[in-house]
Every structure is written in C-alpha cells, then in structure tokens.
Amino acid sequence: MPDMRITRRLEFDAGHRIPNHASQCRHLHGHRYAIEITLSGKIIDTEGASEQGMVMDFSEVKHIARRMLVDHWDHAFLVYQGDQTVVEFLAGLPGHKTVVLPVVPTAENLAAEAFRILDTAYRDTYGNQLRLERVRLFETPNNWADAVR
C-alpha cells in the first residue's frame, strides 16, 4: 500500500499588523485566512473500521484543527508580544479576542506557529504512520506560506 497524502482546508477571519513593515501592513487590518492541513500515512485497511479506506476521516482532521487552532484564531486579533502599544490597547477593550504571539504575525510565522501547534495533535492513532506534513496558510487568495516537515 502506498503512502497517501490528504489535505483539509478551513477558513477563518483575523486581524493583525506587521509593526515594522515599510508599507500598508503596519496598520491594523484583517484577512480572510485559509489554512490547509496536509497529513501523510497509510490507508487504513482494518475490515469494518469506520476509517477503512482512509488515511484519516476528513471530519476528524477538521475537528482537531478547529479545537487546537482555528477556533482560537478566528475573529481574533493576532498580535506580536513585542508590539506593546497594540497589546496594551487591545487589553483595554473589554472581552476582546486577542491572541498574543511570540512572533510577528506574518504569513510565514503564522504558518510555522500553526505547524508547531498542530504537529502534536495529529498522531498515529490508527497504526498507519499518520503525521503532519504541511501547513499552508493563505493570507489572501494570491499569497501563502508553507510550513513543511
């Protein structure tokens, strides 16, 4: 049986800014992000199993991604911890959904951070050598970054 790769795409909305950017991205703004999660593994051949014929059920890929990442970042402002003025401003907004990150929230850094968070979530639970291979984060339909194993 060959190794297979499967990909699930999810979308979310979030705000950010690149504090030292020389152009427009230094301003507070938002995006309709999309994230693609690519997993590799063997096709499950356990007779009668719910996942028979799959690497992983796509609905389970989605459930894990939402629980571990997407629900936290969706409709939040993703801010770099070193961007103190904005961190303090957002902290002053009662009930505001803010995610403080250890990195500047560029597409590249967000893809790498998403990979780090999700890598521990997709494990070989079926004995089929399941593992996270790639996280592709679209900042816009025309711009994306890939974090790959």
Image (cartoon, rainbow, N blue to C red):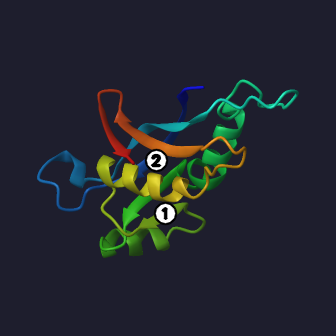
Find the residue positioned furthest to the front.
Answer: 1
State the image coordinates of residue 57 (x, y, percent, origin top left).
Answer: 71, 32
Mark nearer the N terminus (2 vs 1)? 2
- Relative placement, left or right, of 108 versus 12 is left
Judged from the image, the secondary structure of the residue bearing numbered disc 1 is strand
Residue at (30, 55) in percent of width and height: 17
Instruction: From this view, report whether residue 73 is shown above or below residue 45.
Output: below
Which residue is label 1 attached to?
A: 99
The residues bearing labels 2 and 1 have C-alpha atoms spaced at a distance of: 10 Å
Label 2 Cα crowd, 10 Å radius (few <14 / some 14-19 / many 20+): some
- Relative placement, left or right, of 60 versus 111 is right
Which residue is label 2 attached to?
A: 14
Q: Locate the N terminus and report the quarter of the image it occupies.
A: top right
Find the residue positioned furthest to the left.
Answer: 22
Residue at (46, 47) in percent of width and height: 14
Instruction: From this view, report whether residue 121 is shown above or below residue 63.
Output: below
- Relative placement, left or right, of 107 versus 20 is right
Instruction: From this view, report whether residue 103 is shown above or below residue 135.
Output: below
Label 1 Cα crowd, 10 Å radius (few <14 / some 14-19 / many 20+): many
State the image coordinates of residue 65 (x, y, percent, origin top left).
Answer: 60, 46
Identity, as a three-letter code, of the amino acid under mark 1: Val
Identity, as a three-letter code, of the amino acid under mark 2: Ala
State the image coordinates of residue 145 (x, y, percent, origin top left).
Answer: 32, 41
State the image coordinates of residue 73 (x, y, percent, origin top left).
Answer: 52, 52
Residues at circles 2 and 1 in contact by the CB criterion of under 8 Å = yes
**In the image shown, does 74 or 70 lie closer to the viewer?**
70
Residue at (39, 71) in percent of width and height: 87
Residue at (32, 75) in percent of width and height: 84
